[in-house]
Amino acid sequence: MTKNGGMNVFDLTSKIIADIPEGQRFSEKDAELLMRFKSQLLAMEEDLVKGFYDTIEANPQMANLIGHGAREEREKTLRRWWQRTLSGPFDDQYWAWQSLVGVVHIKVGVKNPMMMGMWTWVISWLRTQITPEFVGSKALADEIMVTVERLSLTAQAITAESYLAYYLETVIRITGFRPALLERMFRSEIDVLVGEVRGQLGSI
């Protein structure tokens, strides 16, 4: 919590990262590996950004969220993220930035499935670029891709959990409910909801 009682983004992101199984979350060793190939990865920026937003614009549901004529501004944000990621450090400030993405997504209407889908696009695209020829061996190419996947998982976990956390925080502020009261109401209602979903599923 902050001094005025609001949510502390650094506490939130630290908790989310701690909840990711240690072997799967992004680590200092992963950061060191990315830094070894910083210049080569930075050189991919133009193609990455173009491919990313070409893919979004090809999907009407997502393209409508960009806004007419706003692609250039959105591209600047992606470029800044790519450059910051490959410059380090992966500190509290960096991970809190991923949390901010969750808040912005609420504002502009980007849903978590869209975010996860585009992360999958990034991973798939990088896999076509980070080849044995690119880094010198298949083993090293595979190692880099595992590192990128851990970065993706960590960033997605923070963005998705922050989306939920800030959505609930907004509900609390709008309704005036105390968090403890909202938690009790949630626990009281969740069993009813689970029963309804099971009824819809039938026998599986």
Image (cartoon, rainbow, N blue to C red):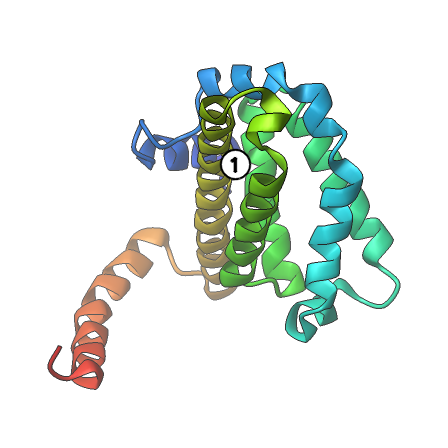
Q: Nearer the viewer, residue 146 or 9?
A: 146
Identify the element where label 1 is drawn. helix
Residue 192 lies, in percent from the top left, at 18, 76
Q: How many marks?
A: 1
At which x and y percent is residue 121? Answer: 58, 52
Question: Taking 63 as reference, is 183 left or right?
Answer: left
Q: Quadrant of the C terminus?
A: bottom left
Give the camera-side residue of 104 and 48. Answer: 48
Q: Measuring 83% from the left and 50% from the top, which residue is drawn there? A: 73
User: Residue 99 placed where, x, y %?
Assistant: 55, 41
- Crowding at dot 1, Cα within 10 Å, few <14 / some 14-19 / many 20+, comes out as many
| Residue shown at 72% from the left, 52% from the top | 51
Say above or below: 23 vs 124.
above
Say if residue 170 shows up in the picture.
no
Residue at 86%, 52% (x, y): give it: 72
Foreground of the two, 172 or 18? 18
Rendered position, 59 above or below 47: below
- The amino acid type, in three-letter code, at marker 1 is Val
Residue 201 is drawn in which quadrant? Answer: bottom left
**185 left or right of 109?**
left
Quadrant of the rendering where the N terminus is positioned: top left
- In the displayed structure, does residue 122 sit left or right of residue 166? right
The residue most toward the right is 69
Residue to which mark 1 is pinned: 9
Q: Position of residue 98 (x, y in %)?
A: 57, 39
- Residue at 50% over, 59% down: 112
Please say whether residue 96 is visible from this viewpoint.
Answer: yes
Left or right of residue 164, residue 71 in this image: right
